[in-house]
Amino acid sequence: MRLRGDTGSIRRQWWIALLSLTVAVTVLVAVRYSPRPSLSESVPLSTVVRDREGRLLRLTLASDQRYRLWVPLSEISPSLVEAVMLQEDAWFRWHAGVNPVSLVRGAWSTYASGEARIGGSTLTMQLARLRWRLQTRDVRGKLVQIARALQLELCYSKDEILEAYLNLAPYGGNIEGVGAASLIYYRKPSDRLTLPEALALAVLPQAPSRRGRLTARDDDAFYIGSGLEAARARLYARWRERHPEDAAEDALLKLPLRLHSARELPFRAPHLVDRVLAERAWHPHDGPELKTTLDARLQRLLEERVRNHLQRERSRGLRNASAILIDTRDMGVRALVGSADYFDAGIQGQVNGADAKRSPGSTLKPFIYALALDQGVLHPASVLRDVPSAFGPYTPENFDGRFMGPVTATEALVRSRNIPAVGVAAQLKQPSFYDFLRRAGVRDLASQNHYGLALVLGGGEVTMEELARMYAMLGNDGRLRALRWRDSDPQEEGARLLSAEAAFVTRDMLRQNPRPDAGSQSASRPLPVAWKTGTSWAFRDAWSAGLVGPYVLVVWLGNFDGSSNPALVGVEAAAPLFFDIVDGLQAARVDLGEPVRQWPLNLKRVEICRASGDLPNAWCPQRGMTWFIPSKSPIRISTVHRAIAIDIASGRPACGPFDPRSMRNEVFEFWPSDLARVFVQAGIPRRRPPPGHDCAGSQDWLGSPPSITSPYRATRYTMRLSHPEQVALNLAATVDADVTRLYWFVGNTFLGSAEPGTALAWTPDRTGHFRLSVVDDHGRSDEREVEVAVVQ
């Protein structure tokens, strides 16, 4: 009976033991394979910023002020992984987190034998100390370290533990992990380490503060110190025992090992890198590496050219500049110089000038003409008036204070004439120039009424980035696309703001703008550049912007505090820097070939009369060719040159049927009165028609009707009740060359007459709306609505 009882008790104990073992194994398996945070989670990391070719631009500090990158085990050199285990924990793959033999040997050497202190920690124990910041100098701390190591082995695989150790191990100063150490010391990723480099990193964590000291030599380079070199030699001896086939490495190990320091880390393109890093919050899934669209080679070129230009111009007080280079093919920013010197507090060097709002001067004029081409207001050879003009209360002036008279649209754009540009902008409908700028992404514009037509001449403010995007739109056949700063940014098709035809013609017009140094051009080969300058009011900003092959280049000179300088003139200060960079691109053999454009385009080449820009009549003496957009460009027959029959005997105009025996035809120029007046002021002779040439109105149909210039359009005039006589308005109009008298009316009431070029004074007898009209002595007329209000 006792035997059977003992047997039953033994069975119960076995069942209890088996159940306990099953529960333990189940718990262990559940713990091992249950979801758990990655060992890299919550570890602050540095960020590596590279250019589009992979060249290092900057390595940032992590939030705890350490250089630290997390590199997967598969991307770490196998030689380094093996060397670390050989140096630190040869039994790593077989123990459960703690190596009892190593612990006993370390304790005996440290506490009993009195010999040198040696560690008994495994790689897992070292990871526990690094991860939880443990103090392991005493027994209690060592026990906590052992418990944590067992926890790590229970929850994570050997590869995960090894990866974490390699990414958290100290490598001297504030450098942690093989990723940061390899990048800083060797300027290469950790999977490209040579054996001598890997062995040096393997022994460094044992005494990072002592072995991490670098030795300077006569060549101003740094090399590993004697302590690190001796430790590496000892490890290599053990390595050779395992790898006798590596005898060829013996010679390499005898060579001095060149190292870099953290102070030598590159700090390139600081403004662009600052911007990309600031935008990381918008891209939470970005990894520790950011690849930008910048080209470090082009960045150095721009920085060098900006620096040299300012050194030459320092005597004129020019101290600061910004520049941006964009590839229109993918809209990548290839170079950005935010200021002349990032570290110069005297010029506020850390301010990014490319993102600062500035008056653009005349750099926006190309888009006025592009809109006018699309809306059928003009074509490149259309003749515009550069004469004293008023647009409502706004009376613009040219930069040089002079007037050229008739100029083609291309000349007006190239020579940056203000009055023709304002006149063209006043004719834009849908969209207006203001609406266009809003659609083009210009931020923070005030209301349209705030600017009026002054917006044409730089009354608003844009950033260099916004301006560059608009010029890139000309290069992309009228499509506005977003700038790309990172290689991962998507490439947009873009919104169409201009037709491909208008963009092409505008580029062609801008290419007629000659270089300021055209007589001494040093470029190895001619390069068509579509470019424009701009000078802001009071000489605060000097600009030059344009298309150079597939690139958009914009440069700015000025002061971030807004102070003025008479030297800040676009064509004198910015254009030389612009073309200095263009020449540098050519000298560096950058591909400046024209990118693929939209083709074919709905364009034709048509013959025009140069004097008027219209289709030539039979008497036009000088003709040319221009681009013409069918169904858009304005078309009419020129009337500037007209033939008048002259009596051979008297030399006076002859009327009646033409008789070749007694008459001859002579061609005269019929210019409007305002243009004729400019010719006289400039001393330019014109053959004006003789009196009586119209033969009592028989040729009236050839002339142009008068155009009222005063009172202004869309303007309210006010009169005071106490002084109503102060509201005398000047009535004036431009007329054709054949006019000798103008007649003015308000409604059906005759006001008076005046000669061309002479104003007639009119004082309204009441307030309200009036319809003014003028009729010339050939019966041609013009009219305008005028509002007169009253104030107390």
Image (tube, rainbow, N blue to C red):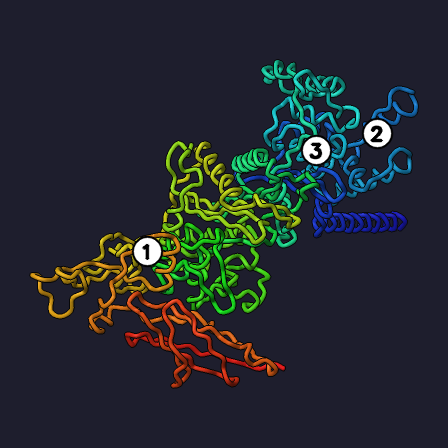
Which amino acid type is marked by label 1? Ala
> Label 3 to label 1, Cα distance in Å?
83 Å
Q: Are marks 3 and 1 in contact (CB under 8 Å)?
A: no
Structural crowding at the residue carrying mark 1, measured as other residues with C-alpha within 10 Å and reported as few (<14), some (14–19) or many (≥20)? many
* Position in image of residue 758 (x %, y %): 41, 69
| Residue position marked by numbered label 3 in the rendering | 93
Q: Secondary structure at mark 3?
A: loop
Does label 1 or label 2 sit earlier along the sequence? 2
Which amino acid type is marked by label 3? Arg
Q: Are marks 2 and 3 in contact (CB under 8 Å)?
A: no
| Visible residue check, residue 491 | no
| Residue position marked by numbered label 2 in the rendering | 103
Residue drawn at 38 percent across, 73 percent down: 754
Q: Secondary structure at mark 2?
A: helix
Q: Which of pointers 3 and 1 indicates the residue nearer the eye?
A: 1
Q: Which of pointers 1 and 2 indicates the residue nearer the eye?
A: 1
- Compared to residue 208, the image places residue 635 above or below, namely below
- Compared to residue 612, the image places residue 393 above or below, namely below
Q: Which image quadrant for residue 148? A: top right
328 lies left or right of 384: right
> Label 2 to label 3, Cα distance in Å?
17 Å
- Compared to residue 427, the image places residue 601 above or below, namely above
Q: Which image quadrant for residue 336? A: top right
467 lies left or right of 81: left
Structural crowding at the residue carrying mark 2, measured as other residues with C-alpha within 10 Å and reported as few (<14), some (14–19) or many (≥20)? some
Q: Which image quadrant for residue 695? A: bottom left
* Position in image of residue 253 (x %, y %): 65, 16
Residue 381: give its label.
Answer: 1
